Image (spheres, grey):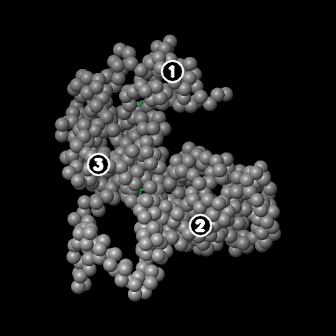
């Protein structure tokens, strides 16, 4: 069966992947269909009914976001009947929605306001005593006003499907329905702001954002998030040089439009009055401000003096892992060529250096092998000495998606268990995570024990090994013939889990291995890298999408710094 289908949208023929919805096909055809409850990151929900379209030869209107496109379909996206239906839906949505656009925070940036204007819908034709709901002003960072809510369910779904938190849900029924926390309490969650981001109206707002600046007044600047190693792209909306709001670009960057609390709200330092914005020179135990020219001259003179007195090795640099590749290149030239030393230090470098050395030895490539968005299609996830929920929130989201959508088997190797294990308990259909907890430093031995189980049980991927590797017999001798490293020291239960983990990795269609780095990582980098890449090679989880090794660097460009 062909993987694609052909259909016509408003007489434009398009070819789309089988399984795509009519809405996706319309996008390919360049036809705009109005939506309110749709977010391409979420499972279709069919709440707003604005996306109605008609199939030629059929009487009923269909939801474009909810109806799979089929071969040979001919879809009409605009007709008097369709427009009438959309207008009616907007009327119904406005039943309990306050008409306060001119003084609303989202004025000019509200999907409902735009559609009401576009479809020429005024005050509702169905007079109705609006039902008042209590407003949540008690939660930090986010405010929720259910009176403005259109019950599209996007906040509920993103919190559950993408974040795996499930803080919000529908409460009550019919016209009394609203979105709330359990027992109507303030939010007690991750404060990622994903619900704020997806809400099409102003039902969720943030006191971190300055809404007095309207969307069209903001100057947008795209920049990588300065926090973790996910390297999400942020769009800073600024006015008169001050950042007013932060957005994510759904079509750019590794995060698929998702951000965590740090990226979305952790930028108040930019305009903080205490931020150092000019060079400071220490004078008599204090600091005085200096111009950049003066500071450069001061540093150059200091380097020259130190070099003349004690040689080039007396000069060194401590470098952040958040610079650009170009800056690292220039720094390298300055120190190696102009000053004559390679004394450049990086925070969290030790584990990474070991990992790089190990990976270079086994794979010939000292880097992560896949992109973040490939994680969601993996069906076995092995986490070594890292809790992505703490260190790499967007990677955590992807792993959560793999668990939810792909029923991925999660295996945790390390000295402590992690919250992600709990995500696997949500559904009896997901395999419960396997936590192989050992003393710090034993991770590589445990990985070798997994390889040992795989080779002993004949579960290795022979075709892959034959085609892509060398030295399997040496590995077999080393791993199978020796005493099992951790096995003897492990409780019976954990031994069984180790064997289960080995089998899961060997049988998985797409297996991914995540290794933690950074100052807090206690892994023996080189040994772990060699054992983990051997495991990936033995099971054939390399060189294809959603299979490979992921080094979770602790800052956004540690890889560039090391290179
Ligand atoms: S801030 Fe994040 S975790 Fe909290 S309710 Fe919104 S989506 Fe859920
Ligand atoms: S709060 Fe916003 S995102 Fe959530 S259901 Fe209401 S309108 Fe939709
Ligand atoms: S996941 Fe990391 S890179 Fe992305 S927004 Fe959060 S801190 Fe920034
Ligand atoms: S976008 Fe299709 S029902 Fe809301």
Number of residues whose C-alpha sits closer than 10 Å to that of mark 2, classed few (under 14), some (14–19) or many (20 or more): many
Task: Name the quadrant of the N terminus.
Answer: top right
Would the CB of label 2 be found within 8 Å of ligand 3?
Answer: no
Would the CB of label 1 be found within 8 Å of ligand 4?
Answer: no
| Residue sitting at x 39%, y 56% | 225
Task: Report if the CB atoms under discs 2 and 1 are less than 8 Å apart.
Answer: no
Image coords of residue 207 (percent x, y): 25, 52
| Residue sitting at x 32%, y 49% | 221
Task: Tell me the tag on residue 525.
Answer: none
Q: Is residue 541 above or below residue 384?
A: above
Q: Which residue is mark 2?
A: 355
Q: Which residue is mark 1?
A: 13
Q: Which residue is mark 3?
A: 237
Answer with mark 2 or mark 1, whichever residue precedes in sequence.
1
Secondary structure state at the residue bearing disc 3: strand
Secondary structure state at the residue bearing disc 2: helix
Answer with mark 3 or mark 1, whichever residue precedes in sequence.
1
């Amino acid at each position: 069966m062909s993987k694609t289908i052909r259909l016509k949208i408003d007489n434009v023929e398009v070819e789309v992947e089988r399984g795509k919805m009519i809405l996706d096909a319309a996008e390919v055809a360049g036809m705009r269909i109005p939506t309110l409850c749709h977010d391409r990151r979420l499972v279709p929900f069919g709440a707003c009914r604005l996306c109605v379209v008609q199939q030629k030869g059929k009487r009923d209107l269909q939801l474009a976001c909810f109806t799979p496109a089929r071969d040979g379909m001919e879809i009409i996206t605009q007709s008097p009947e369709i427009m009438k239906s959309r207008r009616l839906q907007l009327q119904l949505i406005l039943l309990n929605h306050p008409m306060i656009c001119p003084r609303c925070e989202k004025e000019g940036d509200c999907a409902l306001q735009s559609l009401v204007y576009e479809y020429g819908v005024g005050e509702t034709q169905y007079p109705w005593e609006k039902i008042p709901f209590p407003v949540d002003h008690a939660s930090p960072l986010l405010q929720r006003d259910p009176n403005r809510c259109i019950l599209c369910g996007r906040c509920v779904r993103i919190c559950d499907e993408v974040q795996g938190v499930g803080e919000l849900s529908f409460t009550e029924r019919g016209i009394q329905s609203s979105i709330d926390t359990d027992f109507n309490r303030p939010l007690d969650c991750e404060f990622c702001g994903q619900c704020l981001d997806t809400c099409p109206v102003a039902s969720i707002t943030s006191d971190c954002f300055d809404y007095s600046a309207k969307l069209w007044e903001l100057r947008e600047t795209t920049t990588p998030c300065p926090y973790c190693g996910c390297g999400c792209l942020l769009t800073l909306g600024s006015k008169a040089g001050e950042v007013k709001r932060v957005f994510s670009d759904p079509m750019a960057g590794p995060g698929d439009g998702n951000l965590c609390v740090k990226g979305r709200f952790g930028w108040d330092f930019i305009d903080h009055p205490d931020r150092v914005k000019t060079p400071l020179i220490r004078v008599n135990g204090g600091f005085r401000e200096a111009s950049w020219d003066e500071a450069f001259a001061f540093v150059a003179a200091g380097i020259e003096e130190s070099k003349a007195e004690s040689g080039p090795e007396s000069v060194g640099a401590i470098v952040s892992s958040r610079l650009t590749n170009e800056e690292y290149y220039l720094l390298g030239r300055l120190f190696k060529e102009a000053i004559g030393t390679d004394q450049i230090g990086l925070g969290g470098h030790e584990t990474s250096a070991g990992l790089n050395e190990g990976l270079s030895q086994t794979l010939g490539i000292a880097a992560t092998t896949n992109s973040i968005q490939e994680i969601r299609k993996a069906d076995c996830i092995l986490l070594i000495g890292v809790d992505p929920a703490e260190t790499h929130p967007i990677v955590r989201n992807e792993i959560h998606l793999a668990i939810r959508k792909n029923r991925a088997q999660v295996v945790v190797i390390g000295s402590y268990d992690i919250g992600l294990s709990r995500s696997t308990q949500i559904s009896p259909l997901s395999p419960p995570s396997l936590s192989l907890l050992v003393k710090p430093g034993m991770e590589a031995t445990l990985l070798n024990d997994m390889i040992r189980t795989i080779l002993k049980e004949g579960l290795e991927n022979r075709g892959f090994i034959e085609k892509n590797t060398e030295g399997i017999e040496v590995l077999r001798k080393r791993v199978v013939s020796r005493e099992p490293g951790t096995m003897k020291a492990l409780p019976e239960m954990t031994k069984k889990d180790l064997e289960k983990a080995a089998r899961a990795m060997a049988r998985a269609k797409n297996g991914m291995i995540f290794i933690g780095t950074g100052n807090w990582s206690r892994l023996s980098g080189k040994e772990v890298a060699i054992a983990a890449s051997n495991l990936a090679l033995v099971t054939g989880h390399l060189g294809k999408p959603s299979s490979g090794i992921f080094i979770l660097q602790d800052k956004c460009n540690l890889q560039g710094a090391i290179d």
